Amino acid sequence: MVRGGGCRPVRTVTALPPGQCEESLPLRLTRRGRRVVAALSVAIGLSVAAGTLAVVVDAEPALQLAGASTVVVQPGDTLWSIAGSVAPEEDRRAVVDAILDRNGLDDVVLQPGQVLELP
């Protein structure tokens, strides 16, 4: 005696061609999936644009030192040592460049008694 009408659907299995596996079949996205991919692409693009803009806006301003506006060169002083003493938290290379530009110097050789304007 057969219960439930006696007929059940039979599941068929088809073999893939040799060398082809299930992962190599093309991906099919639903409308919802395409919208999610598009939204993610827009979000990533906006994030990259915002990050680039933040880097450009936060670019290092011209070096401005607080305190003395001039320094008198002492024997043994170098631009490197002066830059370290007037702006210990700043990048010394930037401070040296700013001192060179401010004083119109072409050379880093200093003379004792020389007065340097600080940026």
Image (cartoon, helix red, strand yellow):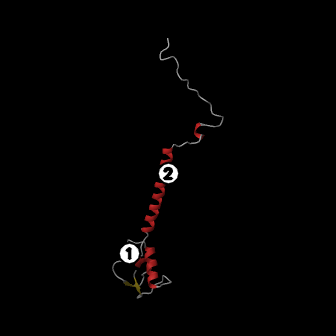
Q: Is there any visible trace of residue 73 in the rendered image?
A: no
Q: Quadrant of residue 55?
A: bottom left
Report x, y in % for residue 46. 46, 58
Left or right of 88, for residue 37: right
Q: Which residue is mark 2?
A: 38
The residue drawn where x is 48% and y is 48% is 35
The residue drawn where x is 34% and y is 82% is 68
Q: Quadrant of residue 72?
A: bottom left
Image depth: mark 1 or mark 2 in front: 2
Left or right of 86, for residue 24: right
Which type of secondary structure does the marked residue at label 2 adopt?
Answer: helix
Q: Which mark is drawn over residue 87?
A: 1
Residue type at mark 1 is Ala
Report x, y in % for residue 30. 51, 43
Report x, y in % for residue 26. 59, 42
Residue type at mark 2 is Ala
The residue sitting at the bottom extreme is: 113
First along the sequence among labels 1 and 2: 2
Left or right of 84, for residue 12: right
Report x, y in % for residue 15. 62, 31
Crowding around mark 2 (Cα neighbors within 10 Å: few <14, some 14 to 19, many 20+) is few
Q: Quadrant of the C terminus?
A: bottom left
**Residue 89 or residue 44, whichever sits in front:** 44
**Residue 94 or residue 15, whichever sits in front:** 15
Q: CA separation, marks 1 and 2?
A: 49 Å
